[in-house]
Image (cartoon, rainbow, N blue to C red):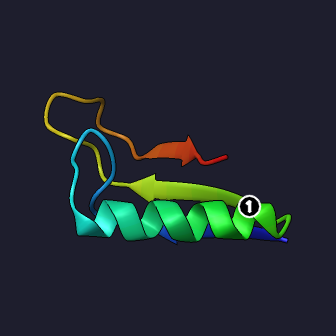
Amino acid sequence: MKLVLVTETFPPEFNGVLMTLGHLAEGLRLKEFEVQVVRPNQKGERKHLDLLGVG
């Protein structure tokens, strides 16, 4: 099954949200889910959304 997690926080930021999201994504990946994380662009990045594969 494919899942997309949407978050405002992802590397290079580092906080509790990032840690929780990382654990969730890894746990889902271990259960054979295909997980992608979508986050808004960070300052200085291109104008479109980045899709970040996890796992």
Q: Hey, what amino acid is under mark 1? A: Arg
| x and y, in percent, of residue 31 in the image | 82, 70
Give the residue drawn at x 21%, y 47%. Answer: 13
Q: Secondary structure at mark 1?
A: helix
Question: Where is 14 relative to 32, above or below?
Answer: above
Viewer-closest of 39 and 17: 17
- Residue 53 figure quarter: top right
Label 1 environment density (alpha carbons within 10 Å; few <14, some 14–19, many ≥20): some
Q: How many marks?
A: 1
Q: How far across and down, in percent of the image, does residue 51 sit?
A: 52, 45
Residue 48 shows in this picture? yes
Label 1: which residue? 29
Percent coordinates x, y for residue 46 in the rendering: 30, 30
Which residue is painted at 28% across and 44% down in the image? 41
Residue at 37% in and 55% down = 39
Q: Is residue 12 left or right of residue 44?
A: right
* Residue drawn at x 26%, y 38% as measured from the top left: 12
| Farthest left residue in view | 43
Viewer-closest of 23 and 39: 23
Query: Can you tell which quarter of the image residue 2 is in?
Result: bottom right
In the depicted structure, whether residue 3 falls above or below residue 44:
below
Give the side of residue 29 with respect to residue 52, left or right. right
**Does the rendering let one see residue 3?**
no
Quarter of the figure with the N terminus: bottom right
Q: Nearer the viewer, residue 46 or 52?
A: 52
Residue 25 occupies quadrant: bottom right
Residue 36 place in picture, x, y as percent: 61, 55
